[in-house]
Image (spheres, rainbow, N blue to C red):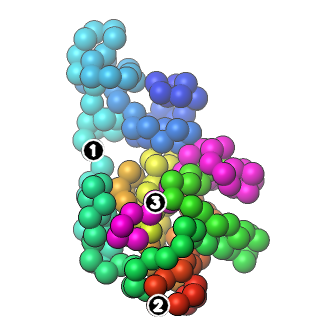
Amino acid sequence: MQCPSCKETIDDDSRYCDQCGEQILVCSVCGRPGKGKRCIFDGKELVPAAGGTPAPTVQTPGMQPVPQSGGSSGGANSGGTVNGDKIKLTSQIHGIMIEARDGDIIGRKNGPFASIFGRFNYVSGTHCKIVKTAAGWHIQDMGSTNGTTYNGTALVPNALYPLANGATIKIADVELLVTFDTAGGGTTRI
């Protein structure tokens, strides 16, 4: 099928576009993808793809999405308050060492690191985003096809998850170590 937002070709069973990250809406009657609130073919309501229900909320102890307003989830940034405007993501296996800033997209086709992640076929075009709020650093899966995990737990698309120093994130099949500066001193590495 073609994504109604970016017009890229995506899998027919996609719930989110793996190129632009937008949620796929389909007509509740004819099943055709569309934008807005109503189907342009029959005027019926558009609903989220794959059964018409939004993604479930993760209830994993110790790691839960935070409210989009930027509220805190309680202590996941265990190194104290966050200093600095960059977060380091490294992989010795893949030879990756990047410094991401607030709002940076990580993807095979989009974002400042596309030249690095372009060689990984399982990473989506717009895979995830790094976000810094008053509560600290967060990661947000952008509806990627092959998902993002945090210390082995799959993330729900479009929800913010707090990052802790020394955490491991896996972007499709690329595992990265997270490090950042904390108020207690320099960069902490576990």
User: Which amino acid is tagged 3?
Assistant: Val
User: Which amino acid is tagged 2?
Assistant: Gly
Verify whether residue 52 appears in magenta.
no
Question: Would you place residue 20 above or below residue 169 in this image?
Answer: above
Q: Which residues are magenta?
A: 109-136
Marks 3 and 1, how far apart at CA: 22 Å
Viewer-side residue, 137 vs 109: 137
Quarter-of-image position of residue 116: bottom right
Which residue in the structure is indicated by mark 1?
A: 54
Marks 1 and 2, how far apart at CA: 40 Å
Viewer-side residue, 101 vs 20: 101
Question: First in sequence: mark 1 or mark 2?
Answer: 1
From the viewer's perspective, is 108 left or right of 190? right
Question: Would you place residue 137 above or below residue 74 in this image?
Answer: above
User: Residue, x 56% and y 46% (percent of image)?
Assistant: 126
Question: First in sequence: mark 3 or mark 2?
Answer: 3
How many residues crowd around disc 3 within 10 Å: few (fewer than 14), some, or many (20 or more)? many
Q: Position of residue 64 (x, y in %)?
A: 30, 68
Secondary element under disc 2, as helix, strand or loop, is loop
Magenta stretch mostly in which secondary structure?
loop
